[in-house]
């Protein structure tokens, strides 16, 4: 059974948007952890929430943040 196609537009309801953010962020981080294992690459995921909270994931994230701070 397939999933319902989600139209890409801003979710107006604040609590629904927050739930979607948490779910999508978790899925993104999971994929980012799988990619280095499968493809022998470095991957960094850096996400800022609407409140400005920083979420980083994977070994390459610290290296990326240091590089961007020096620019």
Image (spheres, helix red, strand yellow):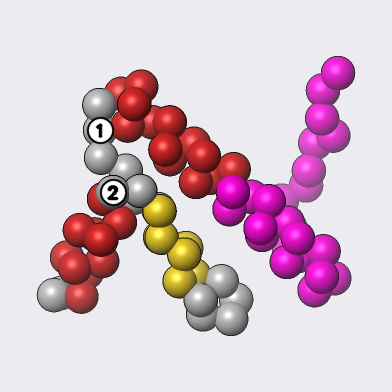
Q: Which mark is residue 41?
A: 1
**In this picture, residue 16 sits left or right of residue 45:** right
Q: Where residue 27 appears, x then y in whole percent?
A: 59, 43
Q: Would you say residue 51 sits in the magenta stretch? A: no
How busy is the neighbourhood of tag 1: few (under 14 within 10 Å), some, or many (20 plus)? few
Magenta-highlighted residues: 1-26
**In this picture, residue 41 sits left or right of residue 13:** left
Kindly identify the residue that appears in the image at 58 percent across and 53 percent down.
25
Residue 47 vertical placement versus 26 (above, below): below
Kindly identify the residue that appears in the image at 42 percent across and 38 percent down.
33
**Helix, strand or loop status at disc 2:** loop
Q: Quadrant of residue 43?
A: top left
Kindly identify the residue that appears in the image at 15 percent across and 74 percent down.
71
Tag 2 residue: 59
Residue 52 vertical placement versus 25 (above, below): below
Q: Where residue 70 appears, x then y in whole percent?
A: 13, 75
Q: How many marks?
A: 2
**Helix, strand or loop status at disc 1:** loop
Q: Where residue 59 appears, x then y in whole percent?
A: 28, 49
The residue nearer to you, when weighing 71 against 47, is 47
How busy is the neighbourhood of tag 2: few (under 14 within 10 Å), some, or many (20 plus)? some
Q: Are marks 1 and 2 in contact (CB under 8 Å)?
A: no
């Amino acid at each position: 059974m397939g999933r319902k196609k989600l139209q890409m537009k801003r979710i107006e309801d604040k609590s629904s948007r927050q739930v979607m953010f948490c779910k999508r962020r978790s899925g993104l981080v999971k994929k980012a952890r799988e990619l280095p294992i499968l493809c022998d690459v470095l991957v960094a995921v850096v996400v800022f929430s609407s409140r400005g909270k920083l979420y980083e994931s994977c070994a390459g994230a610290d290296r990326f943040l240091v590089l961007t701070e020096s620019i």
